[in-house]
Image (tube, rainbow, N blue to C red):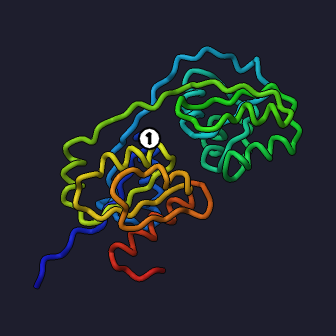
Amino acid sequence: MPPAMPAPLVLLTRPRAASQATAARLQRAGVDPSRILVAPLMETEPSGADWSPADWAGLIFTSAEGVRHATADRDLRWRRAWCVGDRTAEVAAAAGMDAESAGGTADDLVAMISRQRVPGPLLHLCGADTRGDLADRLRRAGTDTVSLVVYRQVPVPLDREAQARLTAATDVVAPAFSPLSAERLAAALTGLSARVHLIAMSSATAAGWSGPPPHATTVVPTPDGAAMERAIVAALRVEAGEPES
């Protein structure tokens, strides 16, 4: 009888807090914890930006990391917040903000704020590697908006345990939430023999992959965390040869 093949592995490479939250949701969806590898390829650090909530009519967040850094040393309870997606809005609401989700992309966020004719001034609290000038787009749409970098992404190498597990894996399900994360994933996985199933937040994210062509690529239909997690679960079942539920 041939030896059993190692089970497919899902590789979570966002900052540790975000990856652990995703891992917990995957486990609730029925994924075996032994099939999840939390191995951040980046962490975040505060930029040291100085700002006062009192100067702004409301805040804009395009990531949960932005919320975490904004609330690290400031009380933002009762502040109005416009958020790109549901998960970001959940984190903002948990911090006590009156948070509203655009339910999708930066385009949806601009449309929501413009539709509400928010006068501003609004402050977009973001990371250093944020793509697209959201503040400029909102200003052109009639809402006074300024962007401020409150955190930076810092590269982190894979540790020995992660390298060993990836070397032993035959199939890796690799979610990428941005073009930058796809680029770093490609660099980290280049040279491994495992087949890679890339789960991409968007077509732009998939285009950020610069390594050998993945065995399979899934671009989720909606750019949100819930869609990514559903795609991860489905990919794990496909790579394991399990019937789809």
> Can residue 22 be seen in the rendering of this structure?
yes
Q: Within 10 angstroms of label 1, few (less than 14), some, or many (20 or more) residues?
A: few
Kindly identify the residue that appears in the image at 22 percent across and 48 percent down.
163
Relative to the observer, which residue lies in front, 213 or 141? 213
**Residue lying farthest to the left in this orientation:** 1
Relative to the observer, which residue lies in front, 124 or 209? 209
Q: Quadrant of residue 142?
A: top right
Kindly identify the residue that appears in the image at 69 percent across and 16 percent down.
52
Q: From the image, tell me which residue sits under label 1.
A: 17
Q: Is residue 144 left or right of residue 198?
A: right
Element type at marker 1? helix
Q: Position of residue 115 (x, y in %)?
A: 86, 45
**Residue lying farthest to the bottom in this orientation:** 1
Relative to the observer, which residue lies in front, 80 or 148? 148
Q: Position of residue 81 (x, y in %)?
A: 73, 36
Q: Looking at the image, is 228 positioned above or below residue 16?
A: below
Q: Position of residue 104 (x, y in %)?
A: 67, 52
> Can residue 78 be seen in the rendering of this structure?
no
Kindly identify the residue that appears in the image at 30 percent across and 65 percent down.
195
Q: Is residue 238 left or right of residue 97?
A: left
Instruction: Give the quarter of the figure containing the N terminus.
Output: bottom left
Q: Quadrant of residue 175?
A: bottom left
Kindly identify the residue that appears in the image at 79 percent across and 46 percent down.
111
Q: Looking at the image, is 120 positioned above or below residue 114?
A: above
Q: Is residue 202 left or right of residue 155?
A: right
**Number of numbered labels in the structure image:** 1
Q: Position of residue 204 (x, y in %)?
A: 55, 52
Identity, as a three-letter code, of the amino acid under mark 1: Ala
